[in-house]
């Protein structure tokens, strides 16, 4: 078998395309595979699909292909232009590459697979390409995958913000809770993010009226966004975020009290974590600090917190009665931070209780968020939020990129 035939088979080339010659340069660690088409072959117009068009002239092009062992491999060939009676002069499509790309499809498929697992900069040094060229590939396939995505069946949406670039900027994420998959990511954490999500939903065959349930934190901007853009959706406040408000109140009580009660020193996490997650020494401390005769404010706040947690174990028919009792307790506790937390719950009453009907929370989003944090690490040196968002879609979007495997 001649080496040209070997490469022809390895590349999966079919007529009229054939490998004409191969040049191997061990000094430069490079293989160049020259491709040509048989004289007299006809081609298809890339615009209208008209067949049997003869080559009008050719353009010399080159594509980076998968490495051949440690050698960089390039395909080089004359690509015909056809003169279509309808569309004019057009460069024909070649089966190994998409138009306008300097890489073969297999090379691009490899980049997309690697980008899910490692930083783009690292891939760049690994394949000896500048990472901006690799980002261009990623953006192309993410845009393509997203343009074909169908959101017509989406009914339950959770959303939250996540920090990009050391907390100075934010990206808001909208997730199909059933998927689960990232539907939309956009810069910012104000109410306009919800508006942009609605627009994006419409562009993907969805509509606002389809969305039955939404879940978010108690941020006024998000609440405003939902009221204005999704007036039919029932809003559930995410229970993890609700618990965070209660926890912060407990922590504030401890912080204030600790000034006069040194025994509270280093007890911070004991009050915030669940008992099951404490070490034995922490449990011992907790038991010492919660004895009644010490009469610690922090201990009282802690019990208010424990009671609130019980809310989510109530049957739906008694949940509101339970919450009312809790509210009375917390607002009569003479602990300012606990009272404030209770007022916050009161202002968001319906959305807190909506959980008993919707049973949704953003736990999935927390999971996706950890993928995002990983994406941030992978996108190290991603430079722009646009790159980070592309990485979020790549990892969380479950899009079909239509690449060879
Ligand atoms: Zn045409």
Image (cartoon, rainbow, N blue to C red):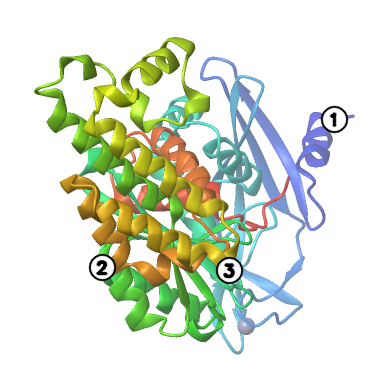
Q: Earlier in the sequence, mark 2 or mark 1?
A: 1
Q: Earlier in the sequence, mark 3 or mark 2?
A: 2
Residue at numbered disc 2: 221
Mark 1 touches mark 3? (CB < 8 Å): no
Judge whether 145 appears above or below 284 on screen.
below
For this rendering, which residue is in front, 190 or 93? 190
Q: Position of residue 277 (x, y in %)?
A: 50, 25
* Label 1 CB less than 8 angstroms from ligand 1: no
Residue 268 shows in this picture: no
The quadrant where ligand 1 appears is bottom right
Marks 2 and 1, how far apart at CA: 68 Å
Q: Nearer the viewer, mark 2 or mark 1?
A: 2
Give the residue number, with chain letter if any, for mark 1. 2
Q: Answer few, some or many: residues within 10 Å of disc 2's Cα (few below 14, many 20 plus, some between 14 and 19).
A: some
Residue at x 51% of width, y 46% of height = 368
* Number of dots carrying numbers: 3
Disc 3 is placed on an element classified as: helix
The quadrant of the rendering that contains the C terminus is top right
Q: Secondary structure at mark 1?
A: loop
Quadrant including the N terminus = top right
Q: Work out which residue is located at the far left of the displayed protein and give it.
A: 259
**Nearest the eye: 180 or 404:** 180
User: Mark 3 packing: few (<14 Cα in 10 Å), some, or many (20+)?
Assistant: few
N-terminal label among 1 and 3:
1
Q: Is residue 208 left or right of residue 343?
A: right
Mark 3 lies on residue: 317
């Amino acid at each position: 078998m001649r080496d040209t035939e070997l490469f022809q088979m390895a590349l999966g080339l079919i007529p009229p395309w054939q490998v004409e010659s191969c040049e191997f340069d061990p000094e430069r660690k490079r293989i160049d595979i020259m491709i040509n088409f048989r004289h007299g072959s006809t081609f298809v117009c890339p615009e209208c699909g008209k067949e049997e068009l003869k080559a009008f002239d050719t353009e010399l092009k080159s594509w980076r292909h998968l490495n051949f062992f440690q050698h960089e491999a390039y395909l080089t060939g004359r690509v015909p232009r056809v003169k279509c009676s309808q569309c004019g002069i057009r460069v024909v499509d070649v089966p190994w590459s998409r138009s306008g790309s300097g890489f073969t499809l297999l090379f691009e498929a490899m980049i997309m697979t690697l980008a899910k697992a490692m930083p783009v900069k690292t891939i760049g040094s690994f394949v000896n390409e500048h990472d901006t060229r690799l980002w261009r590939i990623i953006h192309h396939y993410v845009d393509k995958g997203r343009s074909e995505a169908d959101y017509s069946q989406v009914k339950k949406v959770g959303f939250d913000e996540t920090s990009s670039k050391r907390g100075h900027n934010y990206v808001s994420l909208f997730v199909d809770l059933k998927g689960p998959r990232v539907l939309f990511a956009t810069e910012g954490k104000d109410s306009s993010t919800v508006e942009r999500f609605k627009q994006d939903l419409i562009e993907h065959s969805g509509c606002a009226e389809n969305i039955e349930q939404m879940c978010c934190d108690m941020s006024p901007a998000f609440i405003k966004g939902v009221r204005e853009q999704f007036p039919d959706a029932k809003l559930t406040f995410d229970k993890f975020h609700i618990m965070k408000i209660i926890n912060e109140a407990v922590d504030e009580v401890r912080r204030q009290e600790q000034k006069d009660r040194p025994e509270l020193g280093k007890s911070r996490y004991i009050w915030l974590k669940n008992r099951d997650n404490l070490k034995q020494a922490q449990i011992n401390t907790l038991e010492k600090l919660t004895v009644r005769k010490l009469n610690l404010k922090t201990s009282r706040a802690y019990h208010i917190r424990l009671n609130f947690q019980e809310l989510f174990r109530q049957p739906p028919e008694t949940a509101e009665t339970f919450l009312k009792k809790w509210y009375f307790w917390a607002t009569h506790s003479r602990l300012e931070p606990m009272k404030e937390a209770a007022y916050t719950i009161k202002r968001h009453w319906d959305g807190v209780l909506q959980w008993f009907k919707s049973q949704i929370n953003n736990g999935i989003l927390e999971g996706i968020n950890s993928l995002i944090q990983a994406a941030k690490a992978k996108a190290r040196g991603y430079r722009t939020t646009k790159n980070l968002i592309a990485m979020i879609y790549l990892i969380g979007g479950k899009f079909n990129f239509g690449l060879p495997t």
